[in-house]
Image: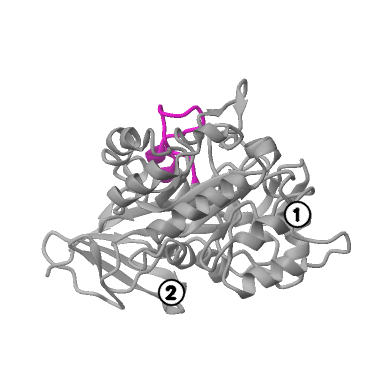
Amino acid sequence: MPFDTILRGGRVIDPSQKLDAVTDVAFAGGKVAMVGKDLKADPGTDVRDVSGYIVTPGLIDLHTHVYWGGTSLGIDAEEFCRTSGVTTAVDTGSAGPGNFAGFRKHVIEPSQVRILAYLHVSHAGIFGFSHKIMVGESEEMRLMNPTDAVTVAEQNRDLIVGIKVRVGLHASGTSGIVPLDIALEVAEQVGMPLMAHIDHPPPSYEEVLARLRPGDVLTHAFRPFPNTAVTAQGTVKRAVREARERGVLFDIGHGKGSFAFKTARALLANGFYPDTISSDVHALCIDGPAFDQVTTMSKFLCMGMSLPDVIAASTVNAAMAMRRPELGSLKPGSVGDATLITIRQGQFDYVDVVGEHLIGDRKIASEGVVIGGRWWHPQEASKFKQLAS
């Protein structure tokens, strides 16, 4: 099969193959076709000179809110992905069984960017989240809709990768941990992983972890006090280590209120790295403090995680969390998505959700993306020289 696109001469970092080398990546038929040096172009192949850039598998943001127009917190997925290098945006519970059909028809299906979703167990998902209105959808038990959630998840397995629930003082109020138990029943019934949000107690961090199964995801895992993963002495809580040992996954989910440098420094110092790095981008944090996926990744790079580890947490690890091994990799046969990044040197001001600033010396910048084997970055296409095929 002739190649549709070749990225020529970039530094390819693909943790799924433990690959870090200057080489070419070719795409055909919407998939990765070959990785190797001096790949031969065919007549009509779109060959891009990406020497001096880093090529990674298409970045996956495991925690976003992109039900634009259907929820008050939704942002435009295509605009976000174009600027942040994300090729797969995973919406985490913006829609529930009562409104997922609209999300699918009006946002997901028309999108050029891949959108997958965790389905909320609450009927209308996260419906009351804005600067002026803040209603915890898990606080009202009448909104829990496990029966329809099972039906909708079964009918939309091509897009729905798991079940979402939000618990904590702000999300579930006096309902506490009960919504989590309901969501776990749904996840068990449909054979999907669950993603649990946690904010202020009740319930406690430990109570939530105790219920999660291998493969379930705790998002906002590096959140500040209260309900943090570390002790006052800066050690990792026993319940946290035990949960990881039995296969619970820890996701960042930065957002407006769920990531603190203090927590992250303590966890990283103890060798406890996030399984997945995600932005939790939505209308209330896209202008700060989260901004986007590459900014969230940059924070971990500046705190000492290696670049391959940061990339893994935004590619192959996220794909495995969703049980979508065709994503997050540049292995031949994988979905033909790639992200081009650079590492800028300088002094960069990063901020967390409690207002602490970190001056970092590096910043990951998105420079372009390939989606489905085709170049997809219309505003800046001229940046990459198009070579003769």
Q: CA distance from mark 2 to mark 1?
A: 30 Å
Q: Nearer the viewer, residue 73 or 182?
A: 182
| Closest to the observer, 231 or 349 | 231
- Residue that extends furthest to the right in the rendered view of this protein: 233
| Secondary element at tag 2 | helix
* x, y percent for residue 153: 35, 49
Residue drawn at (62%, 24%) of the image: 131
The percent coordinates of residue 224 (x first, y second) are 75, 49
Q: Which residues are magenta?
A: 64-82
Is 69 placed left or right of 174 in the picture?
left
Image quarter hosting the C terminus: bottom left
For label 1, the residue is 228
User: Who comes first in sequence, dot 2 or dot 1?
Assistant: 2
Q: Residues within 10 Å of mark 1 (few under 14, many from 20)?
A: many
Q: Nearer the viewer, residue 388 or 333?
A: 333
| Residue 133, above or below 242 | above
In the rendered image of this protein, does residue 44 appear above or below residue 182? below
Question: Residue at label 2?
Answer: 16
Q: Furthest-top residue in view?
A: 132
Determine whether, in the image, residue 298 is placed left or right of residue 381: right
For the stretch drawn in magenta, what is the main secondary structure? loop
Taking the image as shown, residue 389 lies to the left or right of residue 384, namely left
Residue contact at pointers 2 and 1, CB within 8 angstroms:
no
Residue 323, percent from left and from top: 40, 65
* Image quadrant assignment for residue 111: top left
Identify the image quadrant of the N terminus: bottom left
Identity, as a three-letter code, of the amino acid under mark 2: Ser
